[in-house]
Amino acid sequence: MPKDVPLDTSRLQAALLRVLRPLVRLLVRRGITFPALCDMLRELYVNVAEHDFSLPGKEQTDSRVSLLTGIHRKEVRRLRGAGAPVNAVPAALSRTSRILARWLADRDTTDEAGLPLPLPRVAPAGRPSFEALVASVTRDVRPRAVLDEWIDRRLAVLDADDVVTLLDRAFVPQGGDEQQLYYFGRNLHDHVASAVANISAETPRFLERAVHYDGLSEAVAADLERRSRALAMDALTAANRQAHRACESDAGGRWRWNFGVYVFAEELPPPGEAEGTAAPRPPEDGA
């Protein structure tokens, strides 16, 4: 493990306050109180110290975990032994993601621009169809059951000619459902983990960049948000195609890869007020 680069603690705390503000806003809105958060953090501190800061060849002790975390040994003893957290992907979400990824990457199911083609629900063997697409990913669930689920969730439509068309909604998890909360945890974790790895090492390993402009009119901010969404989707679609083709000849292993982008715009507070003290308000005509 590379040696951590020394950090100015006060500057780190200031950065953390900015990172945590939107999360605290979410917690307050969803009724998760400060004492409840403290309980979560206490358990997490013990878990991280136990599993991520053990010394090679030595058993991790309550005393060392207490020293690392500042939590009393009695509490450490009570909280230890839970095992490293496992963030399992919900089965339905994993299945949907894999089918979508293949539909958007396979040459037989996309047009020249890389957009997903409408697919006949069934077709002769060897020809693209929704049933063949589902069967190429999983045989544990009937294709018709998957289609019915997608239609119910408004991810796809089936027309009178028995053709399945993917809807734009399929790309955007909605309103705090299981799918959105899973990606909230995974993507935010990976973004923070890449940034932490970069500031903890002498040479940044991961790409973590942003283009940002202040002092814009609402109209320009909205236009830039709309245009950057299109650029982001182009990049994600291209990366998905590359990954799909690479996986076709890959023997497999224990590594995972995540390529993500984000777009954000907000109205800044009046001069003299601290930035980030108000809830973000996107431009009126932003996509």
Image (tube, helix red, strand yellow):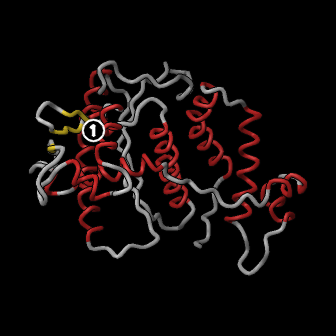
| Quadrant occupied by the N terminus | bottom right
Q: Position of residue 144 (x, y in %)?
A: 29, 43
**For this view, does 281 lie left or right of residue 128?**
right
The image quarter in which residue 228 lies: top left
| Quadrant occupied by the C terminus | top left
Q: Is residue 190 above or below residue 145?
A: below
129 and 43: which one is in front?
A: 129
Q: Position of residue 217 (x, y in %)?
A: 31, 22
**For this view, does 48 lie left or right of residue 130?**
right
- The amino acid sitting under disc 1 is Ser
Q: Is residue 68 above or below residue 170?
A: below
Q: Which residue is found at the position 37% from the left and 55% from the top?
A: 259
Q: Which residue is found at the position 11% from the left and 34% from the top?
A: 161
Q: Is residue 226 above or below residue 53?
A: above
Circle count: 1
The image quarter in which residue 62 lies: bottom right
39 and 123: which one is in front?
A: 123
**For this view, does 270 lie left or right of residue 31?**
left
Q: Residues within 10 Å of mark 1 (few under 14, many from 20)?
A: some
Q: Which residue is found at the position 28% from the left and 37% from the top?
A: 229
Q: Residue furthest left?
A: 112
Q: Position of residue 44 (x, y in %)?
A: 70, 51
Q: Is residue 123 above or below residue 83?
A: above
- Helix, strand or loop at label 1? It is helix
Q: Which residue corresponds to mark 1?
A: 228
Q: Position of residue 194 (x, y in %)?
A: 49, 57
Q: Which residue is found at the position 30% from the left and 51% from the top?
A: 99
Q: Residue furthest bottom?
A: 57
116 and 262: which one is in front?
A: 116
Q: Residue furthest right?
A: 74
The image quarter in which residue 199 lies: bottom right
